[in-house]
DNA sequence: GTCAGGTTTTTGGCATGCCAAATACCAGAA
DNA sequence: TTCTGGTATTTGGCATGCCAAAAACCTGAC
């Protein structure tokens, strides 16, 4: 089926004049396949079934309408990311993380975020720090986080990502996002957030206050302890779901 | 020339009896190519020439004696690692890091290592911590590090890796090793180590002492500050070598 | 000598097809 | 029914070959 020979995106842009940016690199099938597969993997609930989730090159090839070559390259990339593992003559399996791995990842996340907090106290602009409060402006004593879990959870992630971005250290940003992608989906994490929403909001505000006060050590400590708290929760309550 | 059809590793193990482990998965050409290219890239001095270093699929294919397919898959993997970047109809270029990126990476390293130190104070065994001193047993007032840069530099890397391993957090270990691979080769780093050898040894010993004393906060601080010191050095002294 | 215009070469992107290792299946013996 | 071979099928690994976009060359006019 892979053979859509219809000269994709014919350069018939005719008399299109200026403002041509570069037309559009039209990302390769390899990259399209990579994005598509990655999204699919993140969307599925890996931990829902006991049996390992398998992928099939040929099936994916047909589904995506391209040959196996770009699919294989995309798989190789996903394997580098740690999302899948291809076993020689057996198949491609979507990697399932153990509780220990998730806890380790959350601790690494804590390390990166506390460093971000440290850096922020010395370089970020006051207004950008204060703007972090906006993520929680819809929550308070009258509208408690625990009553709007889903919404609060989104604000939560957005807050952490915005916080780390303020460090202006792209390496910290990228590494943390990687971790979040792997950690997301682990059921116990969501439950953990739910159980911890009560203390979560105050802790977040505490971090922001320390940042505003340019108190490097305190900001670092609060950021670290907040996320280590989540790690401790998962370690204590999250039972192994299908080793 | 990719076509060595000589049935590799013929299963003529004849009357070999027990103790058969699994013969040998004989890693794929894709993985062999990946390892070979990775090593080659790490070995070359990327920052030595002004012109970007380019790789050619076909040339590599001949050099390694395999077809382009596994080579391309290996390249895709290396691109995920951030070692190369393939530009559509231009070629594959070995990525060169800017000073800013190197500094950012070192700071991330500091974050991960200080977290490792923190964890070590609560879980590692006394003897394992003390064993860290062995990396520097050949150095002292009579045999100063600055007089044996090369050797001390190796001990230095080994120490940091051993330290992080003691955290028993594989994520920290893997992430740090990744960073070290990228940072290694940046000339200013070596120079930085040379200029800093005098203070380096005492700082290392200080970290070990804090770990032995199970002083979590102090160990974390010393580990962090030690590596942040290197980052500051590179930021201050490492000029941009070929942007 | 310079430069426009056209031709050849180079380079990554893909589609195909075949191979061998594993596995799934199936029939026949006990 | 159960177990043993043996065969068909499935699955990832690779080698090839062709395509189109770019870049490198070449050539002839001015």
Image (cartoon, coloured by chain):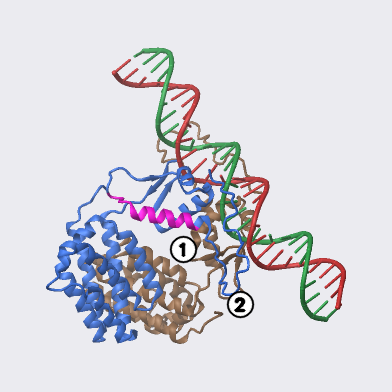
Chain colours: A blue, B brown, C green, D red
Q: Judge left or right: residue A73 versus residue A131.
A: right
- Which residue occupies 45% across, 84% down? B195
Q: Nearer the viewer, residue B168 or A132?
A: A132
- Please state the horizontal and vertical placement of residue B53, each as a whole percent of the image: 60, 69
Q: Nearer the viewer, residue B195 or B90?
A: B90
- Residue A99 in view (yes/no): yes
**Mark 2 neighbour density, 10 Å: few (under 14) some (14–19) many (20 or more):** few
Q: Judge left or right: residue A172 versus residue C15.
A: left
Mark 2 touching mark 1, by CB under 8 A? no
The answer to if B75 sits in the magenta stretch is: no
Q: Please report the bounds of the magenta region as a residue range.
A: A31-47
Write down the residue under mark 1.
B81
Q: Judge left or right: residue D23 versus residue B117.
A: right
- Which residue occupies 29% across, 56% down? A185
Q: Is residue B17 above or below residue C11?
A: above
Write down the residue under mark 2.
B50
- Residue B35 in view (yes/no): no
């Amino acid at each position: 089926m892979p053979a859509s020979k219809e000269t994709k995106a014919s350069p018939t842009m005719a008399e299109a004049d200026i403002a041509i940016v570069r037309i559009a690199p039209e990302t390769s099938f390899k990259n399209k396949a990579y994005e598509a597969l990655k999204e699919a993997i993140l969307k599925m609930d890996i931990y829902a079934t006991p049996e390992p989730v398998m992928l099939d090159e040929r099936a994916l090839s047909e589904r995506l309408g391209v040959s196996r070559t770009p699919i294989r390259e995309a798989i190789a990339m996903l394997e580098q990311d740690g999302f899948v593992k291809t076993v020689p003559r057996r198949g491609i399996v979507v990697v399932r993380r153990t509780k220990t791995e998730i806890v380790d990842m959350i601790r690494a996340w804590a390390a990166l975020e506390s460093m971000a907090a440290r850096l922020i106290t010395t370089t970020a602009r006051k207004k950008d720090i204060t703007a972090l409060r906006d993520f929680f402006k819809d929550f308070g004593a009258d509208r408690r986080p625990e009553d709007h879990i889903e919404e609060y959870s989104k604000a939560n992630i957005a807050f952490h990502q915005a916080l780390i971005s303020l460090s202006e250290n792209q390496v910290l940003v990228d590494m943390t996002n990687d971790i979040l992608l792997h950690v997301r989906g682990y059921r116990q994490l969501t439950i953990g957030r739910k159980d911890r929403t009560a203390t979560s909001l105050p802790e977040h505000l505490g971090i922001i206050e320390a940042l505003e006060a340019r108190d490097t050590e305190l900001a670092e400590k609060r950021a670290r302890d907040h996320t280590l708290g989540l790690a401790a929760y998962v370690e204590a309550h999250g039972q192994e779901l299908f080793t």
